[in-house]
Image (cartoon, grey):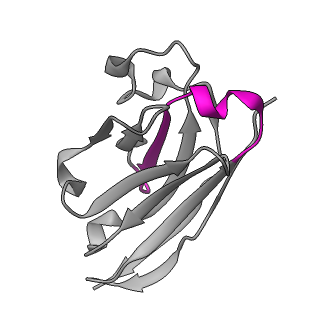
Amino acid sequence: QVKLVESGGGLVQAGGSLRLSCAASGRAFGRSAMGWFRQSPGKEREFVAAINWSAINTYYTDSVKGRFTISRDNSKNTVYLQMNNLKPEDTAVYYCAQASPNTVAGALRLNEGYSYWGQGTQVTVSS
């Protein structure tokens, strides 16, 4: 069974930075792509970033390109999301997700591309 636990959320002023972490249990982490999604009140959960199992390929939604960086440490079963130059519109609950090992790259931007989800961590950016 896979368990994902996010941490690192909080309150930050616009222009500030936060680093989210997601610790994963289970043997499949090193063979699985990982993703970050976010959900604001009244909105659907949306894709933020993803990284393949080897960290060679990364994917971002346009609104965070150049500001957010996804990375992973397979020796620690952990994936990170470094968020710089935060904006009030980045305010949301951020979720970590793990794809199954055979998930194709094209599915990594979709909620349906992931088999396991964390409980989420709140990020609030004040103006």
Q: Where, quadrant-wise, is the N terminus in this rendering?
A: top right
> As drawn, is 63 to the left or to the right of 52?
left
Give residue 52's position: percent from left, percent from top.
43, 32
The reply to whether residue 119 is visible in this rendering is no
Residue located at (48% from left, 16% from top): 103
Q: Name which residue lies at 33% across and 83% down.
A: 16
Q: Image point 24% across, 64% down: which residue?
A: 67
Can you name the residue that lies furthest to the front here? 75
What segment is highlighted magenta in the picture? 24-42
Is 60 placed left or right of 91 in the picture? left
109 inside magenta stretch: no
Q: In the image, is residue 39 part of the stretch drawn in magenta?
A: yes
Q: Quadrant of residue 101?
A: top right
Image location (x, y in percent) of residue 27:
75, 30
Residue visible at 47% across and 69% down in the picture: 19
Q: Quadrant of the C terminus?
A: bottom left
| Vertical comparison of 40 with 44: above or below | below
